[in-house]
Each structure stands twice: as structure tokens, then as C-alpha cells.
Image: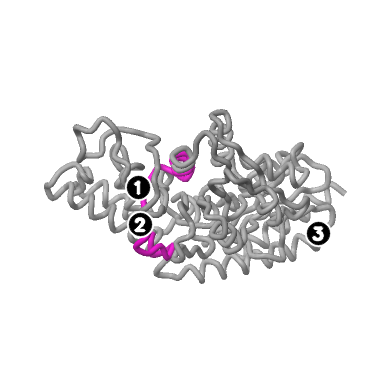
């Protein structure tokens, strides 16, 4: 079987990740972090702190930032967006966004937050950066952008967006769900307010892990309130960073696994992971372009991650994915990928697209097999 659905979650993980989770659960030595002064609690707290430092190292975050762990990037985005924005604010976002951004923003719209969308080019999905200045308002408070599209694999020109935010003194919230571990991220200039990430994709951590790397000077309203282990008599959740995001007990075993995945990336070098994805991408895109009756979506003149969306003839994307699985044992993702505005821009809102996405475990032989299968299916549609 072949696994090409890594943009949803990486099914294959480094052995060190599984071992770290097992050790955390089986060792009998980890208690509840920040919930006691005994060795069991302190060991767990130390493990969490070490994991946060690894995340900061990967993102070149420096001392201006702290990390809070959540159970995925959706939770982190909800906490950040609903904690920063409110009635009377205006936010700029893009048509690349996943529903993890869109739906919180739609909820905020109902509460008085104004939202404008930066559009994309049909076919390539390239972002129309000029619209940033055109849609700026006096009440604009933040830009929210996807670092890498989970449909096209396009990567946003983050330096250009940073420059816009710096010029107009705007907060910048970045959804790094597809880029964390797959593309370089550098927060060292301190312009990004909050970068939300998930653990179960290119960081190769377990499902149910993720978080936010956020500037320590950011003022955030708490979204979830509960125990923090320290300020027990306070009626409100403490608003310090990262505690404002950390009500309740942390997923210590999951964080241990996530830390192991990040450590593997740091040991092997993110550059090696990027080169591997780029090499596979060249083979795949060059091969697809040689096939008749296939439409490949995306901007291939700019940086990207290992995500590729296509359609075969006039066939529905679900049918093509079913054939790939039933006849070739290839797991892909069809449909709309929780990114409806992107599909509207690509004019694929009726049938969706078939998405292939690669990981560090994808091989050139896997890609060659995918191209052979697509050649067969394209021949059926001609």
C-alpha cells in the first residue's frame, strides 16, 4: 500500500516518537506538571519545558516567545483568534484558509469583528498581495494567514506579509499546520504575534498534539478556563503567557512523542527534509505534466511544500481517489480539504480535487507508482 495523505496526518512516524510515548506511559515516573512539588510532577514539568525549548529552537523563536501546548492547531487558532479579536476590530485573511481559521472568524463576525479576504489567482492559487493595502482600514488590527496551503502546497511570502504588518503596526497570526517541519520558519525578528502548529503532520508527533508559539508581551483573553495549579483562589484564568492557554492537565505522553519528532528533525536537519520533499515534487510534477487529461493546481514558480492537488478529465475527485485506493492501494484525499474558499478560487467547488501529499517516508519508487496509476486512470478518461 502507498500512503499519500500526509497533509492530513503522517501515518508513518520515526520509531523514536513511539518509544517516547511508550516510555512516558510505562515508566511510572511522570506525574502532573505544575500540580505538585514532588519528583513525579517536577519530572513531567521538566519534560514539557524541554519540549517547548525544542519547538522554539525549530522556529528560531528566541526569548521574546513562549510556547503553549494544545491538542491541535485548530484549538490553538480558536484560542488565539477569539482571545485577540473582538467587536469593532477588522482583520485581513486569505482565501487559502482552512476552516480552522474560517469558522472562528465567521463566529467573530457575528460578534462584530469585520473580516476581509485577500484573493488568489484562478488555477495557480497564487495570493494577490496587492489587496493587502487595498483592503486595509483604520480599524484593521491583525492579519491572519496560512503559511502553506493544504490544497495547492503554495507557500505564502511571509516576509512580504511581515513587512506589511510592521509598516501598519498590525498583529500577525500564522497557521503553520502544513509548514511546521516541512518548510523553514524563522520568528527571530519578532514580527509574528502567534504561530499555531499541529504535531501530527510534518512534526511527526502523535495525534492530539499541537500548540502556539506566541510573543510573551501579547495580551490574550482566556478562551478555556479551569485549573492552572497555582492561582487556585482567583476567579478568572490567569492571563500570563503561556498559562492563559494551559487550563487543565497537559497531554504529557503526547508532548513527549512530539518532542521526539522535533528532535529527529533537528538532528537530521530541516534542510534535508525540505530537499527530500523538493526532489519528490520535481519528479511528481514533471511526470504529471507529461500525462494527458490531468489538471494540476498550484503555483510552481514559487516555494512550496509537498502537497499537490489535481483532477483527471471531468471525473469527480472522489471517484478518482476511490479507484486509486481500490485498484492501486493508494491513500489520497479527495474533496474540498476543509478549505472551501481555495476551491472556489480554483473553480473546483463542484467536484473538489485529488490531493497527493508526501512525507520524509515517501520514496521515489512511491512517486513513480503514483504516476503509473494516474497514467492508467487518465487513459480511462480520454
Give the residue pinned by disc 1: 254
Whether residue 236 is situated above or below residue 10 in the rendered picture: above
- The first of marks 2 and 1 along the sequence is 1
Q: Are marks 2 and 1 in contact (CB under 8 Å)?
A: no
For image coordinates 65% across by 64% down, the residue present is: 281
In this rendering, the label closer to the viewer, 3 or 2: 2
For image coordinates 83% across by 47% down, the residue present is: 313
Would you say residue 61 sits in the magenta stretch?
Answer: yes
Crowd band around label 1 with a 10 angstrom C-alpha radius: few (<14), some (14–19), many (20+): many
- The first of marks 3 and 1 along the sequence is 1
**Horizontal arrangement in the rendering, residue 355 relative to residue 47 (left or right):** right
Give the residue pinned by disc 3: 291
Regarding mark 3 in the picture, which secondary structure is present there?
loop
In this rendering, the label closer to the viewer, 3 or 1: 1
Crowd band around label 3 with a 10 angstrom C-alpha radius: few (<14), some (14–19), many (20+): some
For image coordinates 68% across by 65% down, the residue present is: 302
Q: Position of residue 210 (x, y in %)?
A: 42, 48
Regarding mark 1 in the picture, which secondary structure is present there?
helix
Q: Please count the marks in the image.
A: 3
**Residue found at the far front of this picture:** 138
Q: Quadrant of residue 89?
A: top right
Crowd band around label 2 with a 10 angstrom C-alpha radius: few (<14), some (14–19), many (20+): many
Q: Give the camera-side residue of 105 and 150.
A: 105
Give the residue pinned by disc 2: 259
Question: Which range of residues does the magenta coloring cover?
Answer: 56-79
Amino acid at each position: 500500500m502507498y500512503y499519500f495523505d500526509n497533509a492530513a496526518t503522517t501515518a508513518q512516524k520515526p520509531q523514536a516518537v513511539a518509544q517516547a510515548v511508550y516510555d512516558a506511559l510505562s515508566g511510572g515516573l511522570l506525574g502532573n506538571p505544575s500540580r505538585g512539588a514532588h519528583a513525579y510532577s517536577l519530572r513531567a514539568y521538566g519534560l514539557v519545558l524541554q519540549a517547548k525549548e525544542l519547538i522554539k529552537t525549530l522556529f528560531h523563536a528566541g526569548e521574546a516567545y513562549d510556547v503553549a501546548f494544545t491538542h491541535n492547531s485548530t484549538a490553538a487558532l480558536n484560542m488565539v483568534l477569539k482571545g485577540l479579536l473582538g467587536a469593532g476590530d477588522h482583520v485581513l485573511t486569505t482565501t487559502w484558509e482552512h476552516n480552522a481559521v474560517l469558522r472562528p472568524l465567521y463566529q467573530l463576525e457575528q460578534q462584530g469583528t469585520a473580516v476581509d479576504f485577500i484573493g488568489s489567482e484562478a488555477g495557480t492559487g497564487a495570493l494577490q498581495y496587492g489587496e493587502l493595502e487595498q483592503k486595509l482600514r483604520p480599524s484593521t488590527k491583525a492579519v491572519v494567514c496560512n503559511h502553506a496551503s493544504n490544497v495547492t502546497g503554495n507557500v505564502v511570502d511571509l516576509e512580504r506579509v511581515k513587512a506589511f504588518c510592521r509598516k501598519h503596526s498590525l498583529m500577525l497570526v500564522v497557521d503553520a499546520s502544513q509548514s511546521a517541519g516541512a518548510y523553514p520558519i524563522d520568528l527571530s525578528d519578532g514580527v509574528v504575534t502567534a504561530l499555531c502548529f499541529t504535531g501530527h503532520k510534518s512534526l511527526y508527533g502523535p495525534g492530539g498534539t499541537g500548540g502556539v508559539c506566541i510573543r510573551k508581551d501579547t495580551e490574550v483573553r482566556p478562551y478555556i478556563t479551569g485549573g492552572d495549579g497555582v492561582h487556585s483562589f482567583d476567579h478568572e484564568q490567569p492571563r500570563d503567557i503561556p498559562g492563559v492557554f494551559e487550563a487543565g492537565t497537559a497531554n504529557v505522553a503526547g508532548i513527549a512523542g512530539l518532542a521526539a519528532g522535533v528532535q529527529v528533525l533537528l538532528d537530521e536537519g530541516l534542510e534535508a527534509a525540505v530537499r527530500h520533499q523538493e526532489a519528490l515534487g520535481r519528479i511528481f510534477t514533471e511526470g504529471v505534466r507529461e500525462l494527458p487529461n490531468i489538471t494540476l493546481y498550484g503555483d510552481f514558480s514559487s516555494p512550496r511544500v509537498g502537497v499537490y492537488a489535481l483532477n483527471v478529465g471531468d471525473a469527480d475527485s472522489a471517484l478518482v481517489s476511490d479507484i486509486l485506493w481500490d485498484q492501486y492501494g493508494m491513500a489520497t484525499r479527495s474533496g474540498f480539504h476543509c478549505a472551501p474558499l481555495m476551491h472556489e478560487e480554483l473553480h473546483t467547488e463542484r467536484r473538489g480535487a485529488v490531493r497527493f501529499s508526501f512525507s520524509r517516508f515517501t520514496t521515489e519508487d512511491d512517486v513513480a507508482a503514483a504516476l503509473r496509476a494516474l497514467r492508467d486512470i487518465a487513459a480511462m478518461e480520454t
